[in-house]
Image: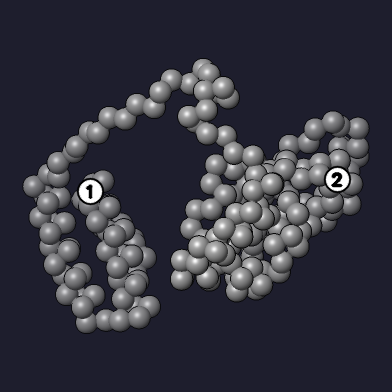
Amino acid sequence: MKAVANQQVVIVSYAIVYRDEKVLQQIAWAGIVLDEAQNIKNPDTKQAKAVRNLNAGFRIALTGTPVENRLGELWSILQFLNPGYLGERQFFQRRFAIPIEKYGDRASLQTLRSLVRPFILRRLKTDRSIIQDLPEKQEMNVYCSLSVEQGQRYQQLVETSLAQIETTEGIQRRGLILTLLLKLKQICNHPELLNSKTPN
């Protein structure tokens, strides 16, 4: 605490916030700014909980991906910024996440947008008044063919794996599919990677 007592700015990693949570909680921070705030998108992680427990006069979160997979990630970031604003997690799931993600409920989506819009400042790459020094985005597709060995192993793996997948169901089936995708990627990178340990 003495080390930060007279400092204007203190920069720490998410890991340090979790490790030194008890010490950092004792400090009344003027404000907290989270960079790469998607690091707290999972509200159950220890570092997300530690960050939410810090005391601050104001809070800001910077992220390019406020929602990557689930709306619960947005809830987690907003829970840090403005605790309780979107309700408790179970309420948010029932009121917004399930209706929108499972049933495509446009009315719930519109309501959620209206709730979070006042708190989100979004920068668009197309806005030239904000980013004047960036060049236009350039994309170049480079196609790489598989070697003969890669092609053979790829085809063999697909055939044997699909036969296994057809005879299984439930969580085991999902596991086989994910394992297949991982192994196919390894073959495309280098066939020898397939010989390394992979999760079953």
Looking at the image, which residue is at 34% across and 72% down? 174
User: Looking at this view, is 146 or 190 the one in front?
Assistant: 146
93 w.r.t. 196: above or below: below
Can I make out residue 106 in this image?
yes
Looking at the image, which residue is at 60% across and 54% down? 113
Q: Position of residue 151 (x, y in %)?
A: 12, 51
Instruction: Kindly state the secondary structure of the residue where label 1 is placed.
Output: helix
What residue sits right under mark 1 in the picture? 188
Q: Quadrant of the C terminus?
A: bottom left
Which amino acid type is shown beneath numbered disc 2? Gly
- State which quadrant residue 92 falls in: bottom right
Instruction: Kindly state the secondary structure of the residue where label 2 is placed.
Output: strand
Q: What's the distance in space between the residues labelled 2 and 1, CA to CA?
A: 50 Å
What residue sits right under mark 2 in the picture? 57
Looking at the image, which residue is at 27% across and 52% down? 186
Q: What numbered label is drawn on residue 150?
A: none
Q: Position of residue 7 (x, y in %)?
A: 86, 32
Q: Position of residue 30 (x, y in %)?
A: 86, 40
Q: Of callouts 2 and 1, which one flags the residue occurring earlier in the amino acid sequence?
A: 2
- State which quadrant residue 11 falls in: top right
User: Looking at this view, is 171 or 131 the one in front?
Assistant: 131
